[in-house]
């Protein structure tokens, strides 16, 4: 239990008989009588007795210990953690949307169905594909949706293809998703330029290949310049190309995955289109497909009928449902608001600013840290702390020291192809002053690694607890706090 500023926990601050006078004792709810006797508490819960003010201060104090985009810079590479415009929250709070029951009659849900249909069409145009499903609740579920459609496509053609190619710069969920969909994965190495090695790819292609899962720009922040040839080579052996859209923030409004040759496209609305992100959700991972894969889309789909919007559920080749209803609709609503506010030209400005910010930071840090690859990057870039490791300082130490200097750390140790990796994505929503402050902190840490490496190895020192033994924490879970310091059972 987190302590208050004076060092005492909420339990230690409690005193018998303390309570608020603003609430009277209330009788037990009628529903309690329906609860079987064996499931009822025999003794009251051991909750602290405190004033209303202490309760408010307790939770306010806890909130101050959290880090979020609303608090400061969040440069997590690959995750696109950027500011969420408040207009999306305002629209999602309108009772016309938030109070709508998912089981209301179709005729009474025309506004919602129109919104979902328009969002699906906007995403299809942005990505250059035929149709989208909005059902997947997150990026990983979107990946699974796409790979299940690829499997169904091949089975429908009388083929039992079992192999999926995954570049070594892919997101970690890609091989896991392919395996969950029943495929085996083979890794395609990167070229010295950080892109898919075409020679190696040719050596992996055969009639057992169901497809390739690929991110563009990849996790090194590099645009796959030979992407059309990659997709063409996979198509020549009968495979399909799957686009992981986690990095679509770099391309929105500028380059369509469908035009690159991809057959399946998943997006993360909670990344690119600025809906709430982190803390376990909510998320949304819509999946788009080219015309040949349309029959396999999950149901239901929203279509525009002759008189009103309808739910389409007459596709016998569909992979079925992924969610009970249409997906995380209020997340889709926030993304719809974002898309309508910006339009295509606004999205082009977003992607341009994101790429500019990343290249600016990369140039400022290139002399102190070792970039994974030379040249320009897209929306993110990867540095190596190999120079700092020569002084006994690891990427983990750099990340912990950033906390002391007031910044959330970037992604570390990913991608695995870069030793002591620091993966940084500034996004388009940060000011030049914020980028400069982060750069100065990173440069200060680089100097400290040479002059006082022990300072970095002892970081962080400004947090309620110091550096934890993460291996021990994973093996010896301690999830319950007991009053009086008693040991957990």
Image (cartoon, rainbow, N blue to C red):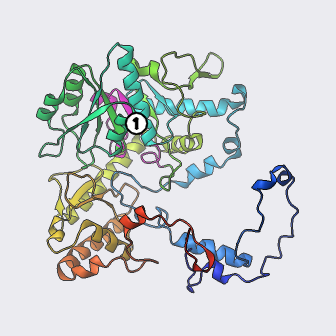
Above or below: residue 460 compared with residue 116: below
Is residue 125 visible in the rendered structure shown here?
no
Highlighted range, magenta: 248-274
Residue on which disc 1 sits: 143
**Which secondary structure lies at badge 1?**
helix
Q: In the rendered structure, does residue 273 fall within the stretch colored magenta?
A: yes
Q: Residue at x 67, y 35 (%)?
A: 102
Is 98 displayed left or right of 167 in the figure?
Answer: right
Q: Which x, y percent locates residue 58?
A: 62, 75
Is 249 displayed left or right of 478 in the figure?
Answer: left
Q: Residue at x 78, y 64 (%)?
A: 42
Q: Which x, y percent locates residue 243?
A: 33, 35
Above or below: residue 438 compared with residue 260: below
Residue sitting nearer the eye, 16 or 22: 16
Residue sitting nearer the eye, 329 or 309: 329
Q: Which x, y percent locates residue 276?
A: 51, 52
Q: Residues within 10 Å of mark 1 (few under 14, many from 20)?
A: many
Q: In the rendered structure, does residue 468 fall within the stretch colored magenta?
A: no
- The image quadrant where one finds the C terminus is bottom right
Above or below: residue 271 compared with residue 484: above
Quarter of the rendering containing residue 15 = bottom right
Is residue 66 visible in the rendered structure shown here?
yes
Q: Which x, y percent locates residue 278?
A: 47, 55
Above or below: residue 330 compared with residue 478: above
């Amino acid at each position: 239990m987190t302590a208050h500023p004076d060092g005492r926990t909420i339990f230690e601050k409690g005193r018998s008989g303390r309570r608020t006078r603003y609430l009277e004792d209330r009788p037990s709810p009628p529903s309690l009588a329906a609860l079987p006797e064996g499931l009822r508490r025999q003794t009251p819960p051991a909750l602290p007795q405190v004033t209303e003010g202490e309760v408010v201060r307790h939770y306010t104090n806890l909130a101050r210990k959290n880090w979020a985009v609303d608090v400061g810079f969040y440069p997590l590479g690959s995750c696109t953690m950027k500011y969420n415009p408040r207009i999306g929250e305002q629209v999602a709070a309108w009772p016309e949307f938030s109070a709508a029951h998912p089981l209301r009659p179709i005729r009474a849900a025309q506004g919602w169905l129109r919104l979902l249909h328009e969002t699906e069409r906007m995403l299809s145009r942005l990505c250059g594909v035929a149709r989208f499903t909005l059902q997947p609740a997150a990026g990983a579920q979107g990946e699974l949706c796409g790979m299940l459609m690829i499997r169904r496509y091949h089975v429908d053609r009388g083929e039992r293809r079992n192999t999926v190619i995954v570049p070594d710069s892919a997101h970690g969920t890609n091989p896991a998703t392919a395996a969950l969909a029943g495929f085996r994965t083979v890794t395609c190495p990167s070229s010295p330029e950080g892109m898919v090695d075409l020679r190696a790819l040719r050596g992996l292609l055969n009639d057992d290949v169901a497809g390739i899962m690929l991110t563009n720009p990849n996790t090194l922040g590099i645009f796959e310049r030979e992407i059309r040839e990659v997709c063409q080579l996979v198509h020549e052996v009968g495979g399909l190309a799957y686009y992981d859209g986690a990095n679509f923030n770099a391309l929105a409004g500028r380059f369509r995955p469908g035009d690159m040759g991809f057959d399946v496209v998943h997006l993360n609305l909670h990344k690119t289109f600025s809906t709430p992100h982190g803390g376990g959700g909510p998320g949304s991972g819509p999946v788009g497909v080219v015309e040949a894969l349309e029959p396999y889309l999950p149901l239901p789909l929203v279509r525009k009928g002759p008189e009103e919007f309808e739910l389409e559920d007459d596709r016998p080749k569909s992979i079925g449902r992924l969610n009970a209803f249409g997906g995380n609709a209020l997340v889709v609503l926030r993304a719809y608001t974002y898309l309508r506010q910006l339009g295509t030209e606004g999205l082009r400005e977003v992607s341009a600013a994101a790429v500019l910010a990343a290249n600016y930071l990369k140039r400022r840090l290139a002399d102190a840290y070792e970039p994974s690859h030379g040249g320009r990057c897209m929306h993110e870039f990867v540095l190596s702390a190999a120079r700092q490791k020569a002084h006994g300082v690891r990427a983990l130490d750099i990340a912990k020291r950033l906390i002391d200097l007031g910044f959330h750390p970037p992604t570390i140790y990913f991608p695995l192809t870069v030793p002591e990796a620091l993966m940084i994505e500034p996004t388009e929503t940060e000011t030049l002053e914020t980028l400069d402050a982060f750069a100065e902190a990173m440069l200060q840490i680089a100097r400290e690694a040479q002059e006082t490496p022990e300072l970095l190895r002892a970081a962080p020192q400004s947090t309620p607890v110091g550096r934890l033994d993460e291996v021990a924490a994973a093996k010896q879970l301690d999830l319950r706090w007991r009053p009086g310091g008693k040991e957990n059972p």
